[in-house]
Amino acid sequence: MNIDQRANPWKWSTFILAVLLASCVFWYLSTGDNVRGSAGAASEPGERNMAGQDESALSAQDDVVLPEHDVEKGQDYSALVPAPDASAEPIRKISTIDRGDSFYAILMQNGVSARQAYDILNETKPVFDLSKIVPGRELVLIFSPDNQDLIGIEYSISDISRLDVSINGESIDARKQEISRVLPSGYSGRIKQTDYIVEKGDNLYTVLRSNGVCDYQIGLVIKSVNKVYNLSGIIPGNAMSIWVTEEEPARLARLTYEIDYLNLFEVVPENGAYKATKQTFDVDVRHERAEGTINSSLYESAIQAGLSPEVVMALSDIFAWDINFFTDIRQGDHYTVIYERYYVKDTFRGYGRVVAARFVNQGSPHVAVYFDDGDGVKGYYDEEGKPIRKLFLKAPLNYRRISSGFSHRRIHPIYQVARPHLGVDYAAPTGTPVVALGNGTVTFKGTSGGFGKSIQITHQAGYVTYYGHLSGYAKGISKGTRVSQGEVIGYVGSTGVSTGPHLDFRVRHNGKFINPLKLKPVNGPPLKGKSLARYKEFSTKRLAMLDDPSLNHTAKMDIEDVSL
């Protein structure tokens, strides 16, 4: 082949394609009948898929393996799923609108479909446009008891208006409801209770406002309250309970305030306004007994024995006309006392009156029983019906005022020194309270030479008492002031000619000075007639209680001391 005789590539390509085509025709003619026969034998008439092919043939061709299913044996799954409770209440999801929130987004966050959210917005728009919800307002989504379907919506438009939306499948009904500012009677909605302890700086307005109550309601509450009790000065530490509606706007359903342990103040809505009442709890009075022997002072010994300071002071007050608790007390003196304890709803709330007492001082017994005949005759009397109260106290110093400040340290001893000038000096710390020995009128107040700052009081039956070397005077004391027995008139000092703080005490009777230590007790009128007979019968029971150890209260009562 010379250079001009070149091969033609197209001729060879045509030849190869012809050979391939002939091979395919031969294969089809030799195998087609077998394939068609197998397919026809495997199918039943009418059992074809949507493409006209047999299902079993497709399964065989795709090599699909279907698992066999056996009914679960011994397992009832239906028992594990609780049946819907027809009586269950709808689920209320309450939220407060925040800045930047949108109604559509809130619905989506709570599992509501986009289509339903759009429908709700569209159907409610003629009544209220929910795309314009305001921060701070309350939105309530109400779901079916099984939490599957949204069935209602509540939105607080204002303090007196609310949007209510009910949803039943495709049906959406929206309406605006005007709300009474004051809760009407017969309200059946949900109410929440808040128990609150008043803090310093609180007032009724701030407490109610913090619980969502509007200014209009608060104004009505204050107006009703002022007719019964002044709540402008609520006391820190006292309890207040507030009931308001869960649904917006919040409306006050009830308010209670504990004035003290015995009195409760209550406010409830009534006829578009509020009604305030004051309630007093029933007090259960129980009698208990205590006794002890003195090793130091009355106060210290009684406190160590577990007696309440209030009872100790009452005991000293009762016998202040017969016993000088500063100078007459001796080691081994013995006391027994019956006193009241107050309980409200089985809770201890404080101490009451000492109803009977016995004090053995230096071997001499003193007995006092409280008696009230209901006709104006009342007070402490001895076994014979003579009043314990006398014209003068035993000492011009206040044991209650001195002792009450020494619960954690020893009492400074008070020394009594008889002087040749027919007076008595009471050596006591500066500032010790000085009291009037009896009822009378201040006839002198000022500085009197070596007597220093002093006070002179004129009493009945020609008695005059003098109090010298005072450091100062009690507020309100001046010439012409009428004072009561036991009233504080001044304070121990060392003014005038004095070697140290003490009280120079003197008594003059009918123009002559007498020894105060020998001042004869002057009793008031004794009980007579029917009053005495009733007292004898009554006192017999009280005196028997003094000897009844089953009434003993052995716990440390000062720990739970609460004054009414």
Image: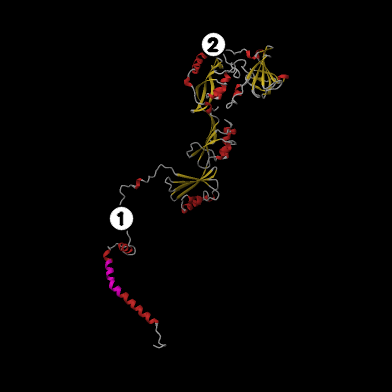
Question: Can residue 307 be seen in this snapshot?
Answer: no
Of residues 472 and 269, the one nearer the viewer is 472
**In which image quadrant can residue 362 be found?**
top right
Q: Is residue 329 above or below residue 196?
A: above
Q: Where does label 2 land, which residue?
A: 529
Viewer-nearest of discs 1 and 2: 1
Is residue 132 on the magenta stretch? no
Q: Where does label 1 land, which residue?
A: 68
Q: Is residue 377 above or below residue 191?
A: above
Q: Quadrant of the N terminus?
A: bottom left
- Residue 550 location, x and y as percent? 47, 21
Q: Residues within 10 Å of mark 1 (few under 14, many from 20)?
A: few
**In which image quadrant can residue 483 be found?**
top right
Mark 1–mark 2 Cα distance, whole angstroms, equals: 111 Å
Of residues 80 and 105, the one nearer the viewer is 80
- Residue 224 location, x and y as percent? 57, 33
Total tally of numbered discs in the picture: 2
Q: Quadrant of the C terminus?
A: top right
Q: Residue at left 32%, top 59%?
A: 65
Q: Which residues are magenta?
A: 26-38
- Residue 450 location, x and y as percent? 72, 19
What residue type is disc 2 on? Gly
